[in-house]
Amino acid sequence: MRPFRLSPAHSLGLPALLVYALVVIFPVIWITYTSLKSDAEIFLAPFALPDPGSLHWENYGRAWTGARFSGYFFNSVLVCGVSLAGILLLSAMAAYALSCFRIRGGRLIFLTFLAGLMIPLQLALVPLFFQMRGLQLLNSRLGLILAYIAWGLPFAIFILSGFFRSLPSSLYEAAIVDGCTEWRAFWHVMLPLARPGLVTVAVFSFLGLWNEYFMAFLFMSGAESEAVRTLPLGLGNISITSQYRSEWGTAFAGLVLVTLPTMAFCLVLQKHLVKGITTGALKG
């Protein structure tokens, strides 16, 4: 077996990738150790490492309890979990029907979903706000969940349609011949085969939902929404408060608390995500 050797192009690209990795990783490291510093240390030496003997772990306690991050965290987990489940279920059923069956007007329906990717979110927020207000869904988790599901469906249907088209139709036909109903053939045969696509959609949708601020701020701007606000809104509240109370250590600790779930989610599904992307590339 011949040893693997880097070509000149790869040799030039490797240092660039290392520099890019450092540029991406350094902000995460900086935010982490800055969250353990006092406000004075942050202002006097923002890039210096904290003193190991005086790490301010109480910043996390103030962020979790004093800044109500425990309640915000629960709201984000609930809203993102239900929204993600709804996106995956509805998009999988829609993509399966539109890609595996000949439906009258199916092409038009698919293009209508794709049109949702072309419309800027800011353009749809004003009519959506009035619609949510008419349905009395403002300042509620249900209203935000429905908005998130509608926002995530076009991308999810676009990705999953390609995966379902790449599956052999003989598997579906064999399941029907063996006595499966349409629902059982979808749920027990076709859906498990599209698992790489589901993981890909889950990761990208979760990242967008967990960090989403604009819609949450617009739909939960009332005073009565304090108990149902999500983590990005809570983090913004800390930042606003920090301008007056100089609690920058608490703000950085809150930022770390917001970042940890996304990092954990991506690390757990990293192998499946790479498999899903490569499978889609090879079959596309």
Image: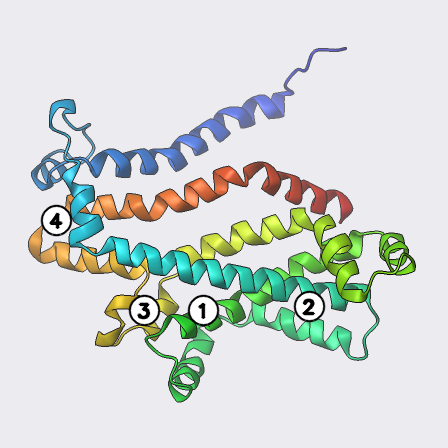
| Helix, strand or loop for disc 2 | helix
| Helix, strand or loop for disc 1 | helix
Q: Which residue is mark 3?
A: 217
Q: Which residue is mark 1?
A: 145
Spatial separation of the CA atoms under disc 3 and disc 1:
14 Å
Which mark is drawn over residue 155?
none
Residue 202 appears at what percent x and percent y? 55, 53
Neighbor class of circle 2 (other Cα within 10 Å; few <14, some 14-19, many 20+) is some
Which mark is in front, 3 or 1? 1
Spatial separation of the CA atoms under disc 4 and disc 1:
32 Å
Q: How many circles with numbers are drawn on the protein?
A: 4
Q: Which residue is mark 4?
A: 247
Looking at the rendered structure, the kind of residue marked 1 is Ile
Q: Which residue is mark 2?
A: 94
| Helix, strand or loop for disc 3 | helix
Q: Is residue 102 left or right of residue 235?
A: right
Q: For this rendering, which residue is in front, 138 or 116?
A: 138
Which quadrant of the figure has residue 114?
Answer: bottom right
Q: Are marks 2 and 3 in contact (CB under 8 Å)?
A: no
Looking at the rendered structure, the kind of residue marked 2 is Ala
Q: Can you name the residue that lies furthest to the bottom here?
A: 134
Neighbor class of circle 4 (other Cα within 10 Å; few <14, some 14-19, many 20+) is some
Q: Can you name the residue that lies furthest to the right here?
A: 177
Q: Which sits earlier in the primary sequence, circle 4 or circle 1?
A: 1
**What residue is rendered at 86% in x and 56% in y?**
175
**What residue is rendered at 8% in x and 57% in y?**
244
Looking at the rendered structure, the kind of residue marked 4 is Glu
Neighbor class of circle 3 (other Cα within 10 Å; few <14, some 14-19, many 20+) is some
Which mark is in front, 4 or 1? 1
Spatial separation of the CA atoms under disc 4 and disc 3:
22 Å
Residue 56 vertical position relative to residue 103 in the rendered view, above or below: above
